[in-house]
Amino acid sequence: MVEIEKAGAELVEDRRLSDVEDNPKLAANINQAHSAMYAEAIERYPNDDAIDGDLERKLVRKLDFRILPLLGICYFFYYVDKTTLSYASIFGIKDDLKLHGTQYSWLSSIFYFGWLFWAIPSNLIMQRSPPAYYLAVNIFMWGALLMAQTAVQSFGALAALRVLSGAFEAIADPAFMLITSMYYTRSEQPARISAWYVFNGVGVAGGGLIGYGIGHIKGSLASWRLEFLIVGAFCCAWGVVLFFLLPNSPTSFRGFNHEEKLLIIARMRRNQTGIEQRRIDWGQIKEAYMDYKTWMFMLLGFVANIPNGGISNFSTLVIKGLGFDTLHTALLGIPQGVLVVIWISLGAVVNNYMPKNSRTLVCALFMLPTIAGALGFLLAPEKAYVARLICFYLTGSYQASFVISLSLITSNVGGQSKKMIVSGMIWFGACIGNIAGPFFYKSNQAPSYHLGIGSLLVANCLEFGLFFVFRYVFIWENKKKQRQREEIKARGEDVALNITAFANMTDKANPNFEYVY
């Protein structure tokens, strides 16, 4: 970053602070923590033309370097943690714990009962807390609980620990989305969400490598117990790293000077969604639950995660059922993960080069390979192992669609409390989908799991249609906003972008808000 001369900065600082004090209307409409610095940022950069493009690009690169690796590596451990049960299934956990009937499916699903119960309360606690610290503590706890699973001797003990693990993991995705929305403009968010979510695929591939390596360890502990112990220890360690390195606020971001912090804040004016507000607004919470779009997002989370609930826990069994031994099954998880990385990266690139408001179209586009793969897996001859394996790998393209759809929330919800509820509700729906997903994979249908793959196909077709519904809804809402702005102008009034940018207004209440789709 080009350093702004310290002496020059000191000369203008007193003038800026004086301007803030002399502009009570501006200060009164900044409803954020550290409001003085927000007012100073607006005075320093009164509009986007005042922001130097080269300085902004350098700032964004610095933000990318400081934030995305931390979130990405965290997401890697997050996904590996969620797939440990899948690899444990091929390392003998069913026999060791004498699991029978639907008990394995229940272990897959019960994790999400803890998540379901704690998703919304955890989001509201995060609003009241420094978000990075809260995320770090939760990551440490889910690692500790995974390590505790090493010692279980029964279905009941493992089930109880998985419920607690689900509760602590409930905050991860909403926290990543919140942090992304705090530092990146709406046009930048799809690529940045893809950048940390792509580690989901790295986690799939890494889980395969970890599983393969642990499978070769011969010791007193069973391989699945070693897996819980090793992965849990890494999660705990990364929680400590995040506690010290991940920022809680643009105003206190270590490694950024005062001018850079002001520029971080000023850039966020374009979003019109605010950045940070620790006070819970119960009116916004009511609005969130009364907004039909909140329930559409919950439905999206549900249909998008019926496939995920099955694949994350049964993918190894599906691959093993195609005729591969245990260690080769673990290795074949690697190309599956690599393809997820490719799908998500390709989705981000395509979206970046498409015209404005193409997100829902890109989401729909990347549903097509998933639908084709599910159809091919169901229709291919039973002995066509390679063809069916390729079709199974194709089903991962839905990840690109879901990742880009997350930016519809970070970009289209204003007001901090409302944002907490809506981001919680899509994962609330995701919990229900993940709970339901494994039960479509009937043990008596192994190894083909036709009902499970069929559920994936139906859910993906519904998700495909839902993206077009979202598109129509946001276009319709924008027309209503345009009429609202015209009525305000007809009355001889005007609401400047600076007045509404950090007023903690909801997307519904803010006349300057424009939905992206």
Image (cartoon, grey):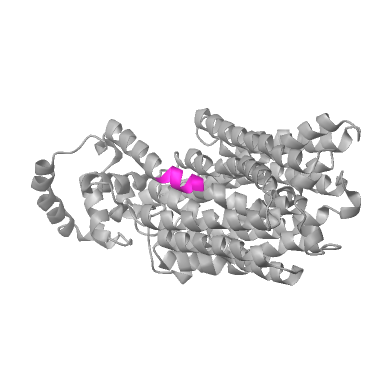
Q: Can you give x and y, in whole percent of width and height, for residue 154 in the image?
A: 75, 69
Estimate the x, y position of residue 478 in percent, counting from the top left.
Answer: 51, 46
Q: Nearer the viewer, residue 459 or 219?
A: 219
34 to 391, vertically: above or below: below
Indicate left or right for 428 with 136 as reference. right
The picture places residue 465, in percent across and down from the top left corner, at 71, 43
User: In the rendered view, does 90 fall on the left or right side of 475?
Assistant: right
Q: Nearer the viewer, residue 409 or 348?
A: 348
Instruction: Give me the residue at 44% from left, 39% from top.
Output: 188
Whether residue 263 appears in this view of the structure is: yes
Residue 437 pos. (x, y %): 76, 54
Q: In the visual, does 24 lie left or right of 365? A: left
> Which residues, given as a range, are shown in magenta?
67-73
**Residue visible at 41% across and 66% down?**
129
In this rendered view, identify the residue nearer to me: 300 or 169. 169
Dominant secondary structure (helix, strand or loop) of the stretch shown in magenta: helix
**Does the magenta run of residues contain 52?**
no
